[in-house]
Amino acid sequence: MDIALIEPEIPGNTGSIGRVCVGTGCGLHLVGTLGFDISERAVRRAGLDYWKDVDLHVQPDRDAWEASVAGRRLWLFSTQGTQRYDQVAYEPDDVLVFGRETKGLPAELVARYPDRLVYLPTTDKIRSLNLANVVTAVVYEALRQQDFRGIVEADGAKSGV
């Protein structure tokens, strides 16, 4: 399973998501213009000592990215979603797609995949949840459905906290 971030803007969110990817065995696709520097020096300065372990795929634009994931099921997460995140039957080769922190997914991507739009329920007191929190919730739901395949649990239950 892979996570795709379309034009992410906040380095802290991407760093947190990278850590989730390392901890769960997911690949991370960074697509299009990034709002920050991901050079080795920049991530080291940010304390992302695990960044070297991220299965990272950087794509210059959405067309290149879509070509790289051709044939895989995409699930697009949006406040405009029509399917609740825990009612989707995730599969190991799926790609979970998230948009920019300030604008969400591009309209043309949403229009291209109208039957793949997913949401997390919230109260009406907020516009949306933090991107890194949403990714974490979705990844763990998807992995729960697959009995956490690929995650090794040492000596019984293991906590990542």
Image (tube, helix red, strand yellow):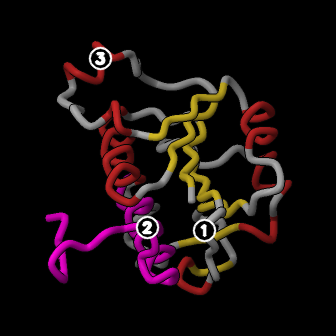
- As drawn, is 6 to the left or to the right of 47? right
Q: Callout 3, which amino acid?
A: Ala
- Which label number is shown at residue 42? 3
- Which label number is shown at residue 150? 2
Mark 1 or 2: in front is 2
Of residues 27 and 89, the one drawn nearer to the viewer in this rendering? 27
Q: Are marks 2 and 3 in contact (CB under 8 Å)?
A: no
**Residue 50 at x, y percent in the picture:** 26, 37
**Residue 25 at x, y percent in the picture:** 43, 56
Q: Callout 1, which amino acid?
A: Pro
**Separation of marks 1 and 2 at Cα, in angstroms:** 10 Å
Secondary structure state at the residue bearing disc 1? loop
- As drawn, is 15 to the left or to the right of 145? left
**Separation of marks 2 and 3 at Cα, in angstroms:** 30 Å
Q: Are marks 1 and 2 in contact (CB under 8 Å)?
A: yes
Q: Callout 2, which amino acid?
A: Gly
- Which label number is shown at residue 92? 1
Secondary structure state at the residue bearing disc 2? loop
The residue shown at (56%, 53%) is 2
